[in-house]
Image (cartoon, coloured by chain):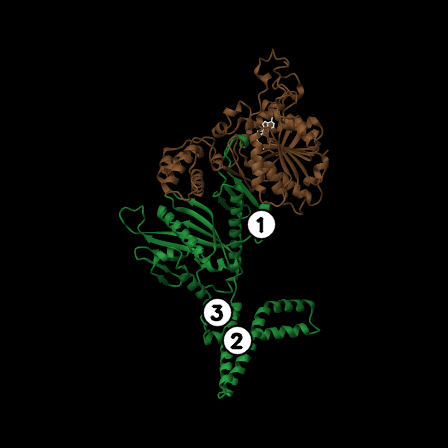
Chain colours: A brown, B green
Amino acid sequence: MGNSRDVISSLTRRETALPYQQTRCLMPRLSTKLLRQARQVDPFLVLLLRPCRELTSARNELRWLTEFVSQRPPSPAGKSKPTELRKRLRKLCEERGRGKPLQYILGTEHFGELELICEPGVLIPRRETAASVTHLVSLLARGAQTHRHPEPLRVLDLCTGSGCIPLLFHHLHRQISPPRPCPNILGIDISGRACDLAFKNLRRTHGHAESRPDIDFAIADVLARGFLPWEAPRVSDVLKTRKKLTWDIVIANPPYISPSSLFVNVERSVRVFEPKLALVPPMPITQMRPLRTRKPDPLFFDFSVKLAPRQRTSPKHDFYEVEDTFYHRIIGTAMEVHAAVMLMEVSSLGQALRVVDMLWRRRRWNRVEVWRDEPDQLPDEGEAELETVNGRTVPIRGRGNGRSVVCWTNEAGPWLGQTDVAA
Amino acid sequence: MADEYPPLSTDLIKIMEQRLSAIEHRSNYLQDLINQPTATATEYSTANKELRRLESSLDLIKQLRAKQKEIDGLSSLLNDCQEDKDMHDMAAGELMEAVEEEKRLQHLLLKSLLPKDDADDRDCILEVRAGTGGEEASLFAMDIFKMYEKHSQKKGWKFDIVDIMESDLKGYKEASGAISGSGVYGKLKYESGIHRVQRVPVTEKSGRVHTSAVSVAILPQADQVDVQLRNEDLRIDTYRSGGSGGQHANTTNSAVRITHIPTGMTVSIQDERSQHMNKAKALKVLCAKLYEMERSRLHTSRSKLRSEQIGSGDRSERIRTYNFPQGRVTDHRVGITHHSIDDVMQGESLDIFIDALLLRQEMDAIASFGSM
Ligand SMILES: C[S@@+](CC[C@H](N)C(=O)[O-])C[C@H]1O[C@@H](n2cnc3c(N)ncnc32)[C@H](O)[C@@H]1O
């Protein structure tokens, strides 16, 4: 038990070995030859090379930006002059060159088969998230061949951001054959901007449909304990007022970046332009005080974190980290609403295994798995398909970085097309 | 109407008549066989199958025979009533229509007798690749790609760019498009091969004429069912930024590379912002390639029986030359030269070559069935 931390750190190291398509490391040097070549084709490419780091991507971005500019004349008068277009294009390329995410400039991002609106202040949906949601629904589709899952399926998405997960889940679920009743989905976020955007996206993807899908969004604080009057409402209170206390599936892509890795492992463009609220869990105030003098202070104790990280008093939790803050509370909420399936995104295999450990301590989940970035692909050479945490093995599926933790109860096994019942 | 069905040559009609009576005999024989109480179950079913295959031709033959009888009747009526003007005019009018109808049936029959390429009705994938000649070849590859794009627009076909790999000077190293419309593959299939260009490249300062080449491939479109594609046979690689992914990174590179493991064939697409769309496009191209591979395998085993006259179907065959200084385009297979190269590059006059090639193919096929 004592060496589980070592197991995990060795894994984290291994994970950084890139299995395939290593076309660039985080910041390859831009050669002068490349810059010259780019300038010869189009001077704007030089601007775009800074965020893109290679010519093919820069060319693609220039094309998308050009299409964007020519499709949207600034004045309602109609077509604008070529020099005018070029001027606007230059402005966008300069913005992009300073690192502003392309999705904030163009205003959209593709998420699976959907195209969603993006606004500064709300996290841009990532393809890894789309991949795990897609895989989950494909398992449900497989299960639907032989078994019935609850109908309508109730899905709770915590930390919903742009609403991408509810919308993609609904979209994919509709394609299951034979058709199933539309799921009932609720997305929760602490940020009002996120909820507004999620509603916008709901209207965008289902604006013309004759029947509005059963998707809703609400503001609530996943971490709140409800003691303090100025906090956003607790999730449980929101569910109570809506009279929706039970849910079948809980999904969450919470902030999972530790304050220390923000400056090491996170791309500059993400760090500078995307909301911290969406990336980094709040620092427990206890952490900021000297270890020895730490004692519960009714005014300063941070209620958002149950355990004091790195405080080795409780052997139970001896290797959890600050960035794990959300998972305790998400798992707790899932138990409260009697969820039978859970899908949580994580930052790495190391964090995945810590979350696996948390789940095993709860004794509710009969099956726990870790999925990599592309859960539907075969693992690459050197990618483990099993890991051991505290003497128990957990299956690792797919290819790439450890990306999510999935668990379910015996009841839900058949929904996901799993016929053998795990002990 | 008269233009639509030019009369067939008497030789051709003679050959065709022989084939028609052979078909009639064969079907009578098969009918008898089926009606025999002694026929075994297998005899019965094979005979039935063959009859079904002949059915559409037989139907046309019956109509043709009926028309021919009508024509005989009308001709003798015409002879008999020289004095009665009203009657005469009526019969003459009827006769003209009947003869026209006979021609139409003969054409249909001829078509039904020609060996058919099942893929003719399919949509197609166009692939253009710069060959020898460096940057100039890439620029010409772009011109050729755009020529087909314009030609498709003129024809009312749908042309979707699948992927473009640009060269250093904004030419195309490689480009592919999906063309859909009725009978597109049948129309364009003879465009496959090496297209050669002779001109002074924009990159050339001394004004010397260069020769370079691009290769064009036209593949019939197919779907996953056509090629019995299984998910297990595919390896799908996507771009990974090499960091920790997820919230740590935000890439716009949506490149997808699909590898068909059994054949080792790969297709990469990076044109779209959506990874999902890139994957769909890559699958489309992969299916077309696998389908073509299977077809050419069948074809080589079949072509031992039947000789193919136009081209070898070989992608390395040089089929056409675009000579800019002389303003001409020459197709080496049919020996046609067209003297307005601009029209061709604008997608206008391609039909001159395409029609000649299709006609040539029909004639070759007819010649070969005369000897069957
Ligand atoms: C990593 S983003 C995920 C967004 C979206 N689900 C996605 O996959 O793109 C995390 C989201 O959690 C929200 N969030 C942060 N703290 C929260 C809290 N205490 N309670 C609820 N949501 C919170 C942020 O506003 C942000 O939208």
Quadrant into which the N terminus of chain A falls: top right
Could you classify mark 2 by the number of other residues whose Cα lies within 10 Å: few (under 14), some (14-19), or many (20 or more)?
few
Task: State the residue position of label 2.
Answer: B18
Task: State the residue position of label 3.
Answer: B366
Sooner in the amino-acid sequence: mark 2 or mark 1: 2
Query: Do marks 3 and 1 share a subunit?
Result: yes
Q: Are marks 2 and 1 in contact (CB under 8 Å)?
A: no
Q: CA distance from mark 3 to mark 1?
A: 36 Å
Towards the viewer: A101 or B212: A101
Residue A36 figure quarter: top left
Towards the viewer: B83 or A137: B83
Horizontal and vertical percent position of residue B370: 49, 72
Q: What secondary structure is found at the residue carrying circle 3?
A: helix
**Residue B137 in view of the camera:** yes
Q: Are marks 3 and 2 in contact (CB under 8 Å)?
A: no
Horizontal and vertical percent position of residue A78: 42, 44
Horizontal and vertical percent position of residue A98: 43, 30
Could you classify mark 1 by the number of other residues whose Cα lies within 10 Å: few (under 14), some (14-19), or many (20 or more)?
some
Q: CA distance from mark 3 to mark 2?
A: 13 Å
**Residue A381 in view of the camera:** no
Q: What secondary structure is found at the residue carrying circle 1?
A: loop
Q: Amino acid at mark 1?
A: Leu
Q: In the visual, does A135 lie left or right of B311?
A: right
Q: Amino acid at mark 3?
A: Ile
Residue drawn at point x = 49 percent, y = 44 percent: B268
Task: State the residue position of label 1.
Answer: B229
Horizontal and vertical percent position of residue A146: 71, 45
Q: On screen, B58 above or below A100? A: below
